[in-house]
Image (cartoon, helix red, strand yellow):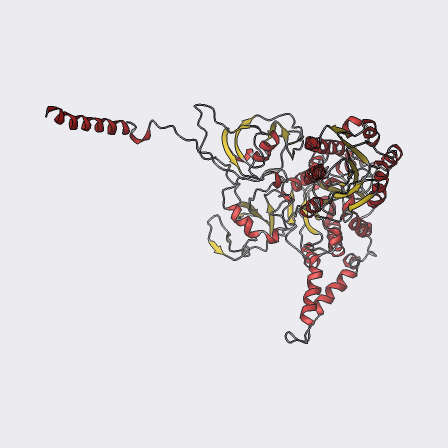
Amino acid sequence: MKLKMIKPHLNAVFIAILLTCSGAKPNGKNKKTKQVVPAIECNVRAGKINNSEFIAKCPANCKETKERVYGTSVFASISSICNAAIHSGVISNSGGKVIVTKMPSQVSYKGSFANGVRSLSLTSWRESFSVSVGKPKKGVNYPSSLDYTPSRPTTVKTALSDSTVWHMTSTPEPTTTTKTTASPTTTPVTTPTTAPPTTTSAKPRVTVHKIREAGSSHPYFRSVARQSQSSQGKGPAQAFRGSSIYANRFSSRTSTGVHRPDMGTAIRRQPQVPSASAPDSDDNKPLSETSHTKETLVESWEPESKSGFNAPGPDLTTRVTEIMSQGDPNCKVDIAFLMDGSWSIGKRRFKIQKDFLAEVSQVINVGVAGPMMGIIQYGDDAVTEFSLRQFSNSKDLKPAINKIVQKGGLSNVGKALSYINKHFFSDANGNRGGAPNVAVVLVDGWPTDKVEEASRMARESGINIFFVTIEGPDENEKQNVVETNFVDKAVCRTNGFYSLPITSWFALRKAVQPLVKRVCDTDRLVCSKTCLNANDIAFVIDGSSSVGTGNFRTVLQFVANVTREFEISDTDTRVGVVQYTYEQRLEFAFGQHNNKADLLNAIKRINYWSGGTSTGAAITYTADQLFSKSKPNKRKIMIVITDGRSYDDVRAPALAVHHKGVIAYSIGIAWAAQDELEYIATDPDKEHSFFVDEFDNLYKYVSKIIHNICQEFNSQPRN
């Protein structure tokens, strides 16, 4: 009986102990705190985050975004965090966690190719960082949210006599509220697109504080995407192109049209007064009547009916208008004209300069499928008169150019080149990514500051710099030139193609056609060329019986992996493939597949042939069928892949293609003959000839080949 009473009592005590143990961690204080890892996008740079050390999670497929990376192991803070992590091997292209540690500025940053990411070289940058595997150290808690640098203020204060006008940012995006007042006390005014006119006669001009997004589509079709991006708390714009950070902000600059007083001693050379016999009306005549004839055709076309089955008029009118508005597709470039607004140029010469630019705008046939044109005026500083996106046809450009008011000041060309590199060629400003960037600098006499460093940075960013110099310094004035031989120090190549010296302001109109022809010659715009977009590459594939079907598919995968690293289009890198046995077969020619997806599918569809091995005949066939049709200024590259000794001689055919400027790589597998591989390869053999013992090891040489191709390209002299 006693035992029965004790048993329930013991059970109750046991249950109480269990309940006490389960509640031994009030408020979870003894639980291990889980590290919260904030997610970032592929385009986020280290410099945009204020934390000195932090952990972040990168998304997948950042490699495809081509976000810029500067340096190796230690990176400039202008670099994409995620692509730097892929380059270092910390994460793969599938994403993952990465720890970022900020470091002081480095003397220089050396570019390299690793893990499918090409990093660029940089002379210096204000801050650095390193990346490591995203496994937090024991006892270290990283911030659960990141402290982004705040956006720059977009209010610009403009002094007008004794009064002050505050202009808030105006943006061309729809449904934007803009504030404009005539005193520091602001009164909101809502408008659907742009700011209402102020009490002055000022014309708002857009200055963009944003960086380029390489490879983006034209901003006319991306305004909604940029709006959503700008609401996500992105940081300030950085100083280099190649970013996809959307800082969707504009700041207005007001030009009052007020006559500025003469600068006295600041004038380098008084403008020469033209003779009375030189009529002003001649300056306003267009060089080419063709564009005006086309415009008249579009404007005067009146369809007879707007409805009915027998009314083809509207369709034809629409088609003619569409063709005219698209621009010249043979001249798809983004052009910035830097016009000299210094006081030394004088009013009449400034008018001649505007007439020249108006003529260029008509001849070049501006449109979204062709060239897009913007203008910067420089003096003491540079300012955007209108951006690339502001006008999409030549007809609207001419009156806009005529309304430009002279800025005054010195001729600081170096500052102007720095300005376009940092601010002008941006996604928000109309840069299209796929079109070469061109800067045409008009200089009256000579610059009043140094241009060498600013132009070098611009060239390394891919800007093709042209100089049009009018009335250069004579023998008595040369001692006043700040930087001797400034044109050769600035332009993309010193071969004369990028410089147009004009003897007189009244001869400037004669330079319209030559200049347009040069800026539209996209094959010669070498500053926009890189090791990844400037090649004609021919793969010569052994399809002999000894290869076999399975190994042949491995070879095709290798070809696809190499191809995937290049920028593919008709104006970028082109790829052709020849398969050979005793005979040869052209699988596809250069330019037959002008986008990467089509090209990779074409490689995948190549059928195995089977037969003997005549490598020498295949090299000759490749020279005749592919390289004879190669474009000028393309780097001709041949990659021969074989698994055995050739039945014919390879020495003479290889020597012949070497003499034609073809850079030849040879890859031998299994039973390939080492001596033949060396004959085929361009010297030095060790950089162009490779051997693997089995097909499955081909992948090891993908990065090596890309590295060698880029190293050779980057070592070319600038002339």
Which of the image's four quarters has the N terminus? top left
In this view of the protein, which residue sits in the foreground, 71 or 479? 71
Above-or-below relation of 444 to 103: below
- Describe residue 402's horizontal placement relative to residue 656 as left or right: left
Which of the image's four quarters has the C terminus? top right
Q: Position of residue 574 (x, y in %)?
A: 75, 44
Above-or-below relation of 225 to 708: below
Q: Position of residue 93 (x, y in %)?
A: 58, 36
Spot the residue most to the left: 1
- Describe residue 140's horizontal placement relative to residue 519 as left or right: left
Q: Position of residue 323 (x, y in %)?
A: 71, 61
Q: Position of residue 239 (x, y in %)?
A: 61, 37
In this view of the protein, which residue sits in the foreground, 712 or 26? 26
Above-or-below relation of 283 to 655: below
- Describe residue 105's horizontal placement relative to residue 394 as left or right: left
Quadrant of residue 669 within the rendered picture: top right
> Can I make out residue 265 in this image?
no
In this view of the protein, which residue sits in the foreground, 573 or 521? 573
Quadrant of residue 536 within the rendered picture: top right
Q: How many discs appear?
A: 0
In this view of the protein, which residue sits in the foreground, 169 or 301? 301
Spot the residue most to the front: 1
> Can I make out residue 105 in this image?
yes
